[in-house]
Image (cartoon, helix red, strand yellow):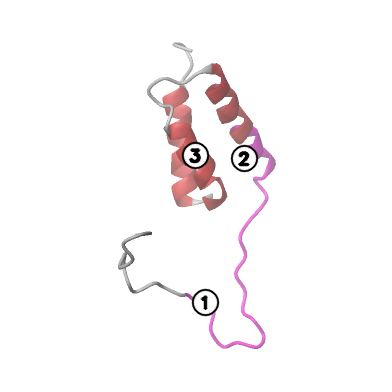
Amino acid sequence: MKNVRYLAAVGSIMYLATTTRPDIAYAASTLTRFRSNPGVAHWNAVKHLLCYLQGTTNYALTYSLDNTSRELFVAFSDADHGGCRDSR
């Protein structure tokens, strides 16, 4: 594992997760947990994720207007900002 560029691969995956591919964010964050001592299983997971990315290059998020609504986006926010002591 010393000759494997695990950190470089995970860094590239993190860049994709934060910029254009939110669908891989959980997998990317899980892979970063093992950056100090990656094993063969972690490298196999990186390769699996890279194969997934290669297979889904033509997928895209498409936003379109709803015929019944005048708004392009509808968003909701929790304005409490961590007021619940149990789950903040």
Place of residue 28 in the rendered image (x, y in percent of width and height, measured from the top left): 49, 39
Q: Secondary structure at mark 3?
A: helix
Q: Between tags 1 and 3, which lies in front?
A: 3
Q: Which element type, helix, strand or loop, lies under badge 1?
A: loop
Label 2: element kind: helix
> Front-most of 79 and 59?
79
Q: Tell me the kind of residue under disc 1.
A: Phe
Q: Earlier in the sequence, mark 2 or mark 1?
A: 2
Which is nearer the eye, 77 or 19? 77
Q: Residues within 10 Å of mark 1 (few under 14, many from 20)?
A: few
Give the residue pinned by disc 2. 53
Q: Is residue 53 left or right of residue 11?
A: right
Identified at 41% across, 20% down, the residue is 37
- The reply to whether the C-beta atoms of the residues labelled 3 and 2 are less than 8 Å apart is no
The residue under label 1 is 73
**Label 2: how many Cα within 10 Å (few below 14, some 14–19, many 20+):** some
Disc with the residue nearer the chain's start (1 vs 3): 3
**Of marks 3 and 2, which one's residue comes earlier in the chain?**
3
Compared to residue 24, the image places residue 49 above or below, namely above
Q: Amino acid at mark 2?
A: Leu
Residue name at image x 42 percent, y 32 percent: 33
Rounded to the nearest whole Å, what is the CA distance between mark 3 and mark 2?
12 Å
Residue that appears at 67% across and 45% down: 56
Residue that mark 3 sits on:
28
Image position, residue 74 (x, y; %): 51, 78
The region drawn magenta spans 50-75
Is residue 55 at least partly visible in the picture?
Answer: yes
Residue 50: image quadrant is top right
Whole-Å distance between the Cαs marked 1 and 3?
Answer: 27 Å
- The amino acid marked with disc number 3 is Ala
Q: Is residue 67 magenta?
A: yes
Chief secondary structure of the magenta portion: loop
